[in-house]
Amino acid sequence: MTHDLIATAGEYVAGLMTPEELEAFERRIATDAEARRAVADWREKLVALDETVAPVVPSESLWPRIEAAVGKALPATAGRPGWLARVWADVSALRFAALAGAAAALLLAVVLITQPFGGAQAPVVVAVLNAPNTSEAGAIVEAYADGRIRVVPLRAIPVPDGRTLQVWTLWDRQVGPRSVGLMPVARQSDYRTSGMPRPIDSQLYEITLEPAGGSPTGRPTGPILYVGRGSAPL
Amino acid sequence: MATVAIDLKDALARCGRGEKAALRVIYESECPAMIGVALRIVKRRELAEEVVQEAYVKIWRNAHRYDPELGPPKAWLYAIVRNQALNVLRDGRREDLVDEVPEDMGSAVEAYQAIERLPDASALRRCLDGLEPRRRASLVMAYVDGFSHGEIAGRLAVPLGTVKAWIRRSLVALKECMG
């Protein structure tokens, strides 16, 4: 391992990089196993400094706020609500971000418009994908039993030159995330997938930013733009 | 201090499968220390809890991406907390605090206390002790207090380029010492 890599990975772990350096180094991590080792090595060595901290008892409201923010704060007695109700419950996280009104109205409109897709067939799983940081809704995924997947962006998603959006799904951690397909520009896209099991409840969908042509590793490497879990409509 | 050893790797795997109970397990075990780590950087209690809240959302959403190749689970979790705290700083949410934070190093800088609290026998402590004091402080101020090169240069009253060089050389020396 070169001194340069040792020092650079150390700067990364110590939080000393500018946003540009950070983006460049994270791209390197995605493709360079030695850089990953250098980062893992520093994290392992320096976490001892975190362990010296004086613990602070969390306020009682913290866990409920986290629960609400992860968008899974369904009442235990709700039974099994209809899929639209569950989509709304997922979207309820948006209310905490004070974004609900417009996004939810738009979401409802899109859901109603896209519902007839596939004739009499209904999707077996529907997911709303939110931005990881702000929880703003960015796209809807409808997955069908025959392997078709429709992705409907809810807003303009800028794609820099030389990059593409890529849609992923994860149904089993052992298998890992699988590519659904590329979306070079943010517009409604239909995909035909094969070799994937029938979509299941809680299946994860996400959109990442990848190099043009798609992730070189077959795994997501770029930043997650939108992510969400599916629910099975009744 | 939590004395019950929980299997963070298993808890992350379960989070990745959508089991919210596993997130709660991580919360029970790590949350107080995580608030402490965030507090060292953002210097204000309610801001530290905000950081931790956002960190848990990221942990939940990214648990399926956890890869042991990128470090032990605990180090991965704390990296998320520290990065989130640094994001808050970059957004300028600590700006209104800058005046309140005393410039005198003893009270404003957590780095010194963190070094003192490292177990005497640990390799990190031994190897940090081998560094020249201001170089040691530069590196630990970045990691523990979340200070930028410029902030460290200001506090130690040395040029920016010197701090950058000190930290890179200290990292190489530390790595050589710890193996």
Image: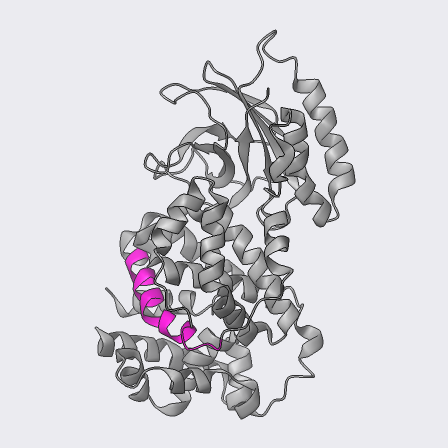
Residue at the spot 59% in from the left edge and 42% down from the top edge: A72
Q: In the orientation shown, which residue stands out farthest toward the front?
A: A77
Q: Looking at the image, can residue A182 be seen? A: yes
Magenta highlight range: A36-54
Q: Looking at the picture, how far across and down is residue A168, in whole percent?
A: 46, 33
Q: Looking at the picture, how far across and down is residue A209, in whole percent?
A: 50, 41
Q: Looking at the picture, how far across and down is residue A152, in whole percent?
A: 61, 27
In the depicted structure, whether residue A93 falls above or below residue A192: below
Residue A12 among magenta residues: no
Q: In the orientation shown, which residue stands out farthest toward the top?
A: A120
Residue A43 among magenta residues: yes
Q: Looking at the image, can residue A156 be seen? A: no
Question: Which part of the image, by quadrant, shows the C terminus of chain A?
Answer: top right
In the depicted structure, whether residue A99 falls above or below residue A200: below
> Which one is nearer the viewer's eye here, B159 or A172?
A172
| Number of numbered callouts drawn | 0
Which quadrant of the figure has residue A62?
bottom right
In the depicted structure, whether residue B65 falls above or below residue B38: above
The secondary structure making up most of the magenta span is helix
Q: Looking at the picture, how far across and down is residue A16, in whole percent?
A: 47, 70
> Which one is nearer the viewer's eye here, A66 or A213?
A66
Residue at the spot 59% in from the left edge and 68% down from the top edge: B48
User: As drawn, is A137 to the left or to the right of B6?
Assistant: right
